Image: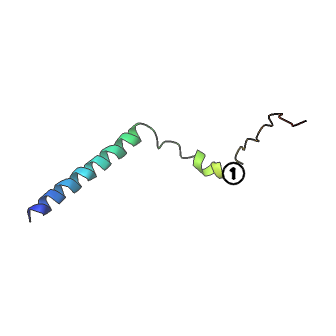
Amino acid sequence: MSVMYILIGCSLFLALCALGAFIWIVKSGQMDDDYTPSIRILFDDLKSKPESTGDTKP
């Protein structure tokens, strides 16, 4: 039965850590941009072409 107290304490600690991390992320502004993800699918990815090095064998 004493193991249950340890598990409840650990789960409360982890839940509070997750809540604190979520609040920190929201306050730091990382979740403010809600427009860009909705239009990102409309644009093509920029793919760089491999440049030729000019090494040709004579």
**Neighbours of disc 1 within 10 Å: few (<14), some (14-19), many (20+):** few
Q: Quadrant of the C terminus?
A: top right
Which residue sits at x=17%, y=58%?
8
Number of marks in the image?
1
List the residue tagged with mark 1: 42
Residue 23 at x, y percent in the picture: 35, 43
Which residue sits at x=12%, y=62%?
3
Residue at the extreme front of the image, as rendered: 58
Where residue 50 sits, quadrant-wise, is top right
Residue at the extreme top of the image, as rendered: 54
Front position in the image: 51 or 24: 51
Which element type, helix, strand or loop, lies under badge 1? Answer: helix
Residue at the extreme bottom of the image, as rendered: 1
Where residue 26 sits, quadrant-wise, is top left
Residue 28 at x, y percent in the picture: 41, 36
In the image, what residue type sits under mark 1? Leu
Which residue sits at x=28%, y=47%?
17
Residue 24 at x, y percent in the picture: 36, 40
Which residue sits at x=26%, y=51%?
14
In the image, residue 23 above or below residue 54: below
